Amino acid sequence: MFLPEMILHCIRTLEQSGFEAYAVGGCVRDSLLGITPHDYDLCTNATPEETAGIFADHTLVRSGEKHGTIGVVINKQVVEITTFRTEGGYQDSRHPDWVRFVSNVEEDLARRDFTVNAMAYHPDKGYIDPFGGQEDLKNKILRTVGEPAARFSEDALRILRGVRFAVRFGLTPTDDTLQAMKTLAPTMDSLARERVFDELCKLLPLVTAKDLEIFRDILVQVVPPLAPCVGFLQHNPHHIYDVYGHTAKVVEAVSKDPVLRWAALLHDCGKPACFTLDEDGVGHFYGHAQISAQLANDYLLSMKSPTALREQVVFLITHHMDILEPDKKQIRRKMGAYTKEALLDLVLLQFADQGKPQEDSHLPAVMECMSQVLAEDACLTVKDLAIDGRDLLALGYSAGPDIGFCLHCLLERVQMEDLPNERQALLAAAQAFLTHPL
């Protein structure tokens, strides 16, 4: 396993002071998988006070000291060095109730969640792997360290982390591990919403439709708007899956962009609430876009999602049933109203929602039309007009709302191709509007 010079420096420095030190956890796992680690954590039998003393000539980060961690700043990067420890439960679902320092690395590894994360490495001694993490990685198995229910009861977020590890690394949970994850999924209700949302944001770009089905019972626990969708048949010739199954397919079909993934996940969550069956036995979901958007908004608010992400997701869900036409006039107006980026995301969501390519789909033509509009450097907003408010003031307009109203009228005429976006033509139209207002 390759260790950067600064990590080797920390290990050697601790050893020269009479202590043990190892690289531990995710960096060991990633290296065994051929993935370059983003960061390296170290563990040692030195106490936090001893570690701080050994690295007293470095800048230290001591915010995690009471839990055994000292951050050592080297080359503007923080290396976290944690004392071998065991710990109690997580009543606040964030920090252990108690921490007890222990004398050897094996005891420290025994407190960790999964075998693939419970490995240490020393540049001379090699791998320390008391729970078979290397073998589990080789066999693509996700297994807890010790009894699954005990591990997940200590910190329920490990359930969602287990889903992420399984998806990211292509691991299959053992039967007892998966069963415990499903059985204890309701305990995730006690977790801080920010922790859950952060984990979901890491997970969503990774999942396939198959993943969403395998871990369905866990995911609906932390995304309640999806629960009514499970097994809800659509009774519609355009849909062969239940609402949840269709949702899973759409999530997989969009790009890994977080906004698109969240929009795909929640775009139809309002369907069960507005289902009707006509006299021919065909199911309809009138108004489901608006209901889904409201449910998504409420959920993302409860999860303390960033405002920008929430608003973009709600916008896409609100408009995902809009009928877009391959018409430049409409496309210009939509781009101006929504932004070109938002309109592109909307089309991509509609593509995914449509499922397999359909011969009568108009969306390819819409995309081509959008490309043409962008290539023409079209006038999409008031800022793109060849005149501005100062020009209207010079014509005799009074400062105030009349200027904005006139500019928007001119923009609409340009977008409808009734007026060229040329300075003299716009000035003439503005002068005529001033003389003969509508």
Image: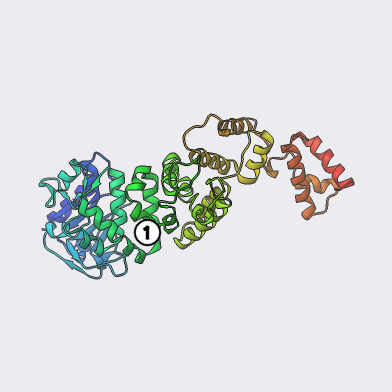
Residue at the limit of the structure toward the front, as seen here: 279
Q: Is 76 on the left-hand or right-hand side of 30?
A: right
**Is 371 placed above or below 282 here?**
above
* Location of residue 419 by image quarter: top right
Q: Which residue is mark 1?
A: 221
Q: Quadrant of the N terminus?
A: top left
Q: Look at 31% across and 64% down and name the residue there.
A: 187
* Location of residue 147 by image quarter: bottom left
Q: Residue 222: x percent and y percent?
A: 38, 58
Q: Is 244 on the left-hand or right-hand side of 400?
A: left
In this rendered view, identify the residue nearer to me: 18 or 141. Answer: 141
**Is 269 placed above or below 362 here?**
below
How many numbered dots are placed on residues in this image? 1
**Is 147 placed above or below 427 here?**
below
Tell me if I can see residue 196 in this picture: yes
Q: Residue 129: x percent and y percent?
A: 13, 50
In this rendered view, identify the residue nearer to me: 350 or 33. Answer: 350
**Is 97 placed above or below 78 here?**
below
Q: Secondary structure at mark 1?
A: helix
Which colour scheme appears in the figure?
A: rainbow
Q: Residue 371: x percent and y percent?
A: 59, 31
Tell me if I can see residue 58 in this picture: no
Residue at the limit of the structure toward the right, as seen here: 435
In this rendered view, identify the residue nearer to me: 402 or 155. Answer: 155
Q: Is 253 on the left-hand or right-hand side of 373?
A: left
Q: Is 161 on the left-hand or right-hand side of 20?
A: right
Label 1 packing within 10 angstroms: few (<14), some (14-19), many (20+): some
Q: Look at 34% across and 54% down and name the residue there.
A: 217
Q: Residue 84: x percent and y percent?
A: 17, 61
Q: Amino acid at mark 1?
A: Gln
